[in-house]
Image: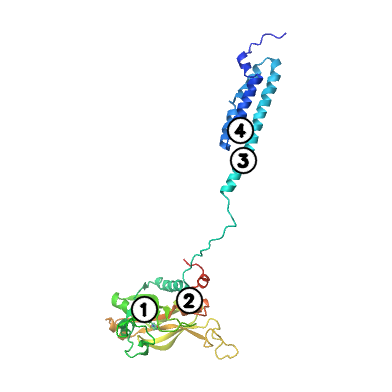
Amino acid sequence: MSGPNTEFDPKQVAALDAQAIESMVAEALAGIAEASNLDELKAAKTAYAGDRSPLALANREIGALPPAAKADAGKRVGQARAQVKKALEDREQILIAERDAQVLQAEAVDVTLPVQRNPIGGRHPLTTLMERMADVFISMGYDIAEGPEAEAEWANFDALNVPPDHPARTMQDTFYVESPDSGVVLRTQTSPIQIRAMLERELPIYVVAPGRVYRTDELDATHTPVFHQIEGLAVDEGLTMADLKGTLDHLATQMFGEGIVTRLRPSYFPFTEPSAEVDLECFVCRGASVGDPNNPCRTCGSEGWIEWGGCGMVNPRVLTAVGIDNQKYRGFAFGMGIERTLMFRNGVTDMRDMVEGDIRFTRAFGVDA
Ligand code: DAH
């Protein structure tokens, strides 16, 4: 016979009877089933399967049972704990699947949706080229100068030493605002900005002036009644034609790349003396087409050179017209067409493409900030 079981405690043993265990399991299963997300399930796991859960506490009581009752109780508690563990695992599977489905739905990307149909615009290549040309001068310390597009005839012609009977003044070339007597024209060149700069600024003067100009030309592949020029003007002591040439060469290199060759060809402009045309060596044939009928060049018309703009030393009469001492100061000036520059530089063959505003033309130059 075994002796009395001093550790025997009827109350604790009551916690291990079949009914008590069953109700612990029932409570656990209900709680687990109620967990509606993984966080709640974690809390349920602690409550029903954690170290301090009723079943874990019951498990600890087994040792206190009389040996005959131990096996039975152990089996009961073991099965109950296994059941709860299984329920937790099953519920976890379900909740994980639910969570994944939710994430997939919330983060779904519909690859069949139409793309952005409103294309973003690009800046016009004339605008960006004009800015690039101006930037070459800004980096040399020049200022940007401006003037109005509806300009005083005096600034556009008289002060630039254009004689009153010069053919350029006639209504065939110049758009007059109101009538030819109004004294106001749509500027035919950016050169009147030279006059304004010299009237308004302190000496020495180093300015560039990009801008829109107007002439009564029909729109065709090489003409447009509204086009753009960039004007340059330097007035200082001791300037020479070498300064002008060096400045133009620098601009040409910046625009067309290292190795571009320029030449100054004697010419005439009323506001410069001496005057010259700035030519670029044809970068297609490099002069090879000259005098070779078997090898014509379309870019330069087999001339070997392309006319880029006009330039010269500011005519002393112009300095006088704006009150600058022409003994002390000398100036150089130049002006070239932006459209022409874009044609040479980017191989645009028809000026109409530049004015039609077709986004397909602009976009080919890239979206420039
Ligand atoms: N204004 C002239 C034109 O439109 C171009 C020009 C020639 C500008 C000589 C100048 C210059 O500044 O010095 O044809």
- Which colour assignment does the render follow? rainbow
Tag 1, which secondary structure? strand
**Residue 169 seen by the camera:** yes
Tag 2, which secondary structure? helix
Q: Earlier in the sequence, mark 1 or mark 3?
A: 3
Query: Label 1 crowding class (10 Å Cα cut-off): few <14, some 14-19, many 20+?
Result: many
Query: Label 3 crowding class (10 Å Cα cut-off): few <14, some 14-19, many 20+?
Result: few
Q: Earlier in the sequence, mark 2 or mark 3?
A: 3
Q: Looking at the image, is mark 3 or mark 4 nearer the viewer? A: 4
Q: Looking at the image, is mark 1 or mark 4 nearer the viewer? A: 4
Q: Say if disc 4 is inside 8 Å of ligand 1.
A: no
Q: Is residue 256 left or right of residue 25?
A: left
Q: Return the x and y of residue 205 as percentages of the image width and height.
A: 33, 76
Distance Cα–Cα, label 1 vs label 2:
27 Å
**Frontmost residue, 50 versus 267:** 50
Distance Cα–Cα, label 2 vs label 3:
61 Å
Which mark, by number, is residue 33?
4
- Residue carrying label 1: 233
- Residue carrying label 3: 96
- Residue carrying label 2: 354
Tag 3, which secondary structure? helix
Q: Quadrant of ligand 1?
A: bottom left
Q: Earlier in the sequence, mark 2 or mark 4?
A: 4
Q: Is residue 120 above or below residue 264?
A: above
**Frontmost residue, 270 versus 49:** 49
At x 62% / y 24%, what residue is drawn?
24
